[in-house]
Amino acid sequence: MKDLTILAKVKFDLRDPDEAYFARYELESILDAEAKPIKTIAALFRHYPFSELEEDVIHLITRHLYLGEIQGYMAKVDFVDIDKLVSRPAFFREIYVIVPSAR
């Protein structure tokens, strides 16, 4: 079962819209998993696990969104190498790792 949800926001200041598509391949190579394009990040907060987030966290995630066709990418993984996730991305400024709570 894939427990970790990765949400990667595309940089809001990309100069070329094609870079948003290159970002998908970058994220997939880092995670070794398929990344799903997210057209509207705000729409995610209606669904679990995003619906469980605190208001302050939602505010942080929804600020400085890219105004192009795709605002980010989401992937579900079992494991993530945090070092690669932090050091390698060129097309992402913010990457969130969402772990379900043990309720």
Image (tube, rainbow, N blue to C red):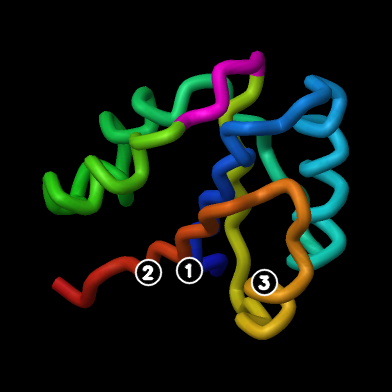
Is the C-beta separation of discs 1 and 2 under 8 Å?
Answer: yes
Q: Quadrant of residue 98?
A: bottom left
Which residue: 55% across, 68% down?
1
- The residue stretch that appears in magenta: 65-69
- Closest to the camera, between mark 1 and mark 2, is 2
Q: Does residue 67 show up magenta in the picture?
A: yes
Q: Residues within 10 Å of mark 3 (few under 14, many from 20)?
A: some
Q: Quadrant of residue 100?
A: bottom left
Residue at the disc numbered 3:
85
Is the C-beta separation of discs 1 and 3 under 8 Å?
Answer: no
The answer to which of 18 and 43 lies nearer the viewer is 18
Q: How far is the residue under mark 1 from the one under mark 3?
A: 17 Å
Residue type highlighted by circle 3: Leu
Which residue: 35% across, 27% down?
42
Residue type highlighted by circle 2: Val
Considering only order in the chain, which callout, 2 or 3, is on the residue closer to the N terminus?
Answer: 3
The answer to which of 50 and 83 lies nearer the viewer is 83
Mark 3 element type: helix
Q: Quadrant of residue 86?
A: bottom right
Residue type highlighted by circle 1: Asp
The answer to which of 88 and 82 lies nearer the viewer is 88
Considering only order in the chain, which callout, 2 or 1, is on the residue closer to the N terminus?
Answer: 1
Image quadrant in which the C terminus is located: bottom left
Mark 2 element type: loop
Where does the image place residue 51, in percent across and percent down from the top left?
23, 42
Residue at the disc numbered 1:
3
Residue at the disc numbered 2:
99
Where does the image place residue 81, in percent across and percent down from the top left?
67, 82
Which residue: 35% across, 36% down?
63
